[in-house]
Image (cartoon, grey):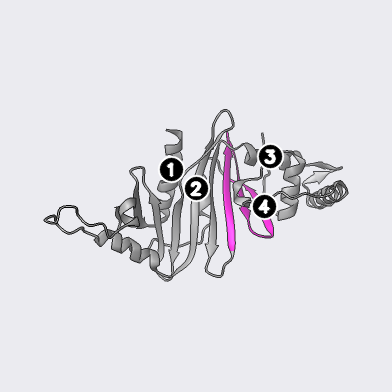
């Protein structure tokens, strides 16, 4: 299977209409819910026709049929064995989503916002880097690395049962809470997923990359031991976290 050789920007509705025309099932999760709506057959045919016309004008369809490379690119997205993806929410309330879909030696990156969808080929070998490249370029924030039990974070006022016991040390949980309260320019919720042989899709827990105003980026996630980890969100830390998370899904 081959994919497109250059980036293509299409209207969001045209992308979703082409997806439906190929009967690929549900669109990628980055498109959210509420993607399906009923329409009369006549309007559906008109929408399909206008979509094919637009795609033909941009080299993605010919003689009423979708271009094979465009079709194969969408199929890679639909059947990807591995996915790296996420949503971004910015201070000005704008939003965006990113998906890197890998199937065999083919990989496609999808950037989606409220109006347009960009589909472009990327190297299958470096999906975490392909995802990170779409986030704002930012250094890691100078924060202290901590790991706090999630139950303790949810209830930091826990007191010892034994009145003679030492007071509970809340320094790490207080620090984590303080960092999470700092002003931020953006938050990025990142995931990995894999598809099993029977088509069943397994998704990871989220990794949160938070852009602190004037300070840099921090990374927070729940570890396999149930601890909430906080560390500086350097490019290396983000790539390691994504790759480790993806490897954990295969274990």
Q: How far apart, in angstroms, are the residues tagged by discs 3 and 2?
A: 21 Å
Q: Residue at x 19, y 52 (%)?
A: 161
Foreground disc of the pair 4, 1: 4
Q: Secondary structure at mark 1?
A: helix
Of pointers 1 and 2, the one earlier in the residue sequence: 2
Foreground disc of the pair 4, 3: 4
Task: Bin the neighbour count of mark 4 within 10 Å (Cα to Cα): few under 14, some 14-19, many 20 and up.
Answer: few
Of pointers 4 and 2, the one earlier in the residue sequence: 4
Task: Bin the neighbour count of mark 1 within 10 Å (Cα to Cα): few under 14, some 14-19, many 20 and up.
Answer: many
Q: Which residue is mark 4?
A: 34
Q: Which residue is mark 2?
A: 191
Query: Does residue 239 sit above or below 104 in this rendering?
Result: below
Furthest toward the top, the residue is: 197
Q: Is residue 104 magenta?
A: yes
Q: How far apart, in angstroms, are the residues tagged by discs 1 and 3?
A: 26 Å
Task: Bin the neighbour count of mark 3 within 10 Å (Cα to Cα): few under 14, some 14-19, many 20 and up.
Answer: few
Mark 1–mark 3 CB contact (< 8 Å): no
Q: Which residues are magenta?
A: 95-122
Of pointers 1 and 3, the one earlier in the residue sequence: 3
Q: Which mark is residue 25?
A: 3
Instruction: Examine the image and state in which quarter residue 80 appears.
Output: top right
Mark 4–mark 3 CB contact (< 8 Å): no
Q: Which residue is mark 1?
A: 245
Of pointers 4 and 3, the one earlier in the residue sequence: 3
């Amino acid at each position: 299977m081959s994919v497109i050789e250059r980036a293509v920007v299409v209207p969001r509705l045209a992308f979703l209409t082409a997806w439906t025309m190929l009967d690929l099932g549900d669109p990628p999760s980055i498109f959210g819910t509420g993607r399906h709506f009923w329409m009369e057959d006549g309007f559906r045919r008109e929408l399909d026709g206008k979509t094919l016309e637009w795609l033909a004008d941009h080299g993605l369809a010919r003689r009423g049929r979708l271009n094979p490379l465009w079709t194969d690119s969408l199929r890679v997205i639909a059947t990807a064995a591995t996915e790296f993806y996420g949503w971004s929410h910015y201070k000005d309330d704008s939003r965006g989503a990113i998906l890197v879909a890998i199937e065999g030696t083919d990989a496609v990156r999808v950037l989606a916002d409220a109006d347009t969808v960009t589909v472009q080929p990327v190297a299958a070998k470096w999906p975490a880097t392909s995802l990170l490249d779409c986030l704002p370029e930012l250094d890691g924030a100078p924060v202290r690395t901590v790991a706090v039990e999630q139950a303790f974070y949810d209830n930091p006022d826990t007191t010892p049962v034994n009145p003679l016991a030492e007071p509970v040390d809340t320094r790490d949980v207080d620090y984590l809470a303080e960092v999470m309260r700092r002003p931020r320019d953006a938050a990025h919720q990142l995931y990995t997923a894999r598809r099993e042989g029977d088509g069943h899709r397994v998704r990871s827990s989220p990794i949160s990359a938070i852009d602190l105003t004037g300070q840099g980026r921090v990374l927070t996630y729940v570890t396999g031991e149930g601890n909430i980890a906080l560390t500086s969100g350097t490019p290396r830390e983000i790539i390691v976290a994504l790759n480790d998370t993806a490897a954990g899904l295969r274990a």
